[in-house]
Image (cartoon, coloured by chain):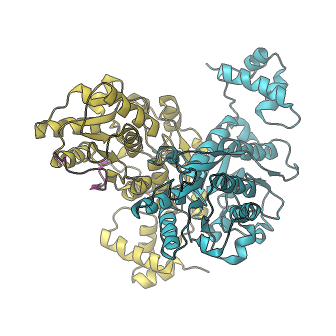
Chain colours: A yellow, B cyan
Amino acid sequence: MGASLKDVAQLAGVSVKTVSNVVNNYPHVTPAMRERVQRAIDELGYRPNLTARHLRKGRTGIIALAVPELGNPYFAELAGAVIDAAARHDYTVLLDHTAGLREKEVLVSQGFRAHVIDGLILSPIELEADDLLGRPGDAPLVLLGEREYDAPYDHIAIDNVAAARTAIRHLAGFGRRRIAFLGARREMARQPAHLRLRGWREELTAAGLPHDDSLVAATDAYGRWDGAAAMNALLDRGAEPDAVFAYNDLMALGAIRALVERGLRVPQDVSVVGFDDVEEGRFSTVALTTVSPDKQAIARLAVERVVARLSGAPQLQPERIHPGYTLVARESTAPRTG
Amino acid sequence: MGASLKDVAQLAGVSVKTVSNVVNNYPHVTPAMRERVQRAIDELGYRPNLTARHLRKGRTGIIALAVPELGNPYFAELAGAVIDAAARHDYTVLLDHTAGLREKEVLVSQGFRAHVIDGLILSPIELEADDLLGRPGDAPLVLLGEREYDAPYDHIAIDNVAAARTAIRHLAGFGRRRIAFLGARREMARQPAHLRLRGWREELTAAGLPHDDSLVAATDAYGRWDGAAAMNALLDRGAEPDAVFAYNDLMALGAIRALVERGLRVPQDVSVVGFDDVEEGRFSTVALTTVSPDKQAIARLAVERVVARLSGAPQLQPERIHPGYTLVARESTAPRTG
């Protein structure tokens, strides 16, 4: 039952070896060839049985994925995409959440459960570059997320500065003048690395708009509650924003809730842009305008880098890869009137 | 660095053996003793290092958790709770999603990746009792969710019939008369097992209210989009509900979006109750009234059953355990006026 490697080779009109190269994600397969074989794989529903081979190689077929929190749907959606991408290479995903705690992130990056993990994909919040020095073992590590590290590991993340600038440009284009930022990190030392805040500042400067501190709300965490609290704090101190760019969608949705409770209209009085494009933003009563990172591409690229290093190309140069993003305009942003 | 078993024993004023019994979740420890030891563990921040012991026993320290989809925040929140509960017993969680497909659920229940998994927690959608016959190996299996099985495995789920009746009673108490059900399963053969629909019917009968088929919308899936589509379908065929009980929160939020788009007011014209208590329901512009299962208890009990079977009590009788639930009344339900 099920198609064989040979069936795939026959349908694609290539050798079994070529199919094997594609399935194992070996380098030096041209994109065109990869696509041709993948089409045959999809058509036949071929599923490679690599488990036995994993074991022969002393591997478990398990990639660990560590995200800050599953309660944030961005990470849940990303985890789902990673699980699917890994399954296409016959890998299973061991999922952990770190609560964004440095201690936990160090534990994970240093090889917690190393005896059952072939590779690791980690989305850190508090981890420092020093924590990655002298990492034991040779299990491939791929980093995700906004934080940039001067360390010899693959890092896959959208261009956060450019993406933030796109959001601000959208608001400025609607005539918004006092654009707040919700969700700055508290520790000022970290600010140079805070790419979304940097994008906000750069684009406001380019547009000749104010970016005074009264328009920035720092928070300790990045959930709905934090967004609502930060919005209220801004309004309480009289900041009078006519637009808000939030660090993520959850904070944006919390901010909308807070604005509506105070009798302000979204988008007329205050327009709001989030970041992540989680599904709930599409269905909220005021559907959320947001920066949408290509989660499928992030997941696919992360898995491919791990698998490539496990499958004959361990010495690949570490790369910074920037998947795409789009600005999705919905109901929470509109031109300023009056 | 870090507290030892002996430190915990000293602080709790008990023997090291007793602490070990609690840490290993052996049976026959009284709840009072368990709590006393747990308090000392929490106070000292003691974290048992069982990994070496796992390996000595030929175990990996990994429990698999298979849920239908991580994109549904209920399962993401539950997965987070299971990961935390497992960590307290020094177990790690290998997470998989099945898309609610019977084929995938069978694969998981039959021991996919069995060589690295000590036990399995599975929340099935399509799995049939027959699929559980002749399960190979002896890795403990705990079932979660609404489906009930005549099979010798632990099953942990709230009393879904009673919980649904509570939701309908809440709506009927507000004078709602035409209470729709969104999210019935399409296959009629499955209906007797459809506990939330059964609760809806039972409580309407008890209240002397109609439960004709025009008030039931069947769907193929249970997301926001499905809730919006089901709501529109009901209204299009002139069902004129004054209340809606949705299979889950995502469907309820989709339904609210559809109602608002058609100019109906929530809760005045149509009151809406969901099921799951996912965080976004608290922050939606019309905050969602919902049935809130005790997710922490579900996760804790599931992990404890697996760990107990792995730690000296493999012959425990299979049990059906019903954790608690509450009805959380928010803005989406209100008395009928006029």
Magenta region: A318-338
Residue A100 shows up from this direction? yes
Magenta stretch: residue A46 in it?
no
A192 over B321 or under it: above or below: above
What's the magenta bit mostly, secondary-structure-wise?
A: loop
- The answer to if A330 sits in the magenta stretch is yes
Q: Position of residue A127 (x, y in %)?
A: 42, 32
Quarter of the image that includes the N terminus of chain B: top right
At x 72%, y 56%, the residue is: B165
* x and y percentages locating residue B204 in the rendered image: 71, 63
Q: Is residue A310 visible?
A: no
Residue B303 or B264: which is nearer the viewer? B264
- Answer with the quarter of the image where residue B303 lies: top right
Task: State left or right for residue B83 relative to residue A309.
Answer: right
Q: Quadrant of the C terminus of chain B?
A: bottom right
- Residue B43 position within the rendered picture, expressed as x and y whole percent measured from the top left: 67, 20
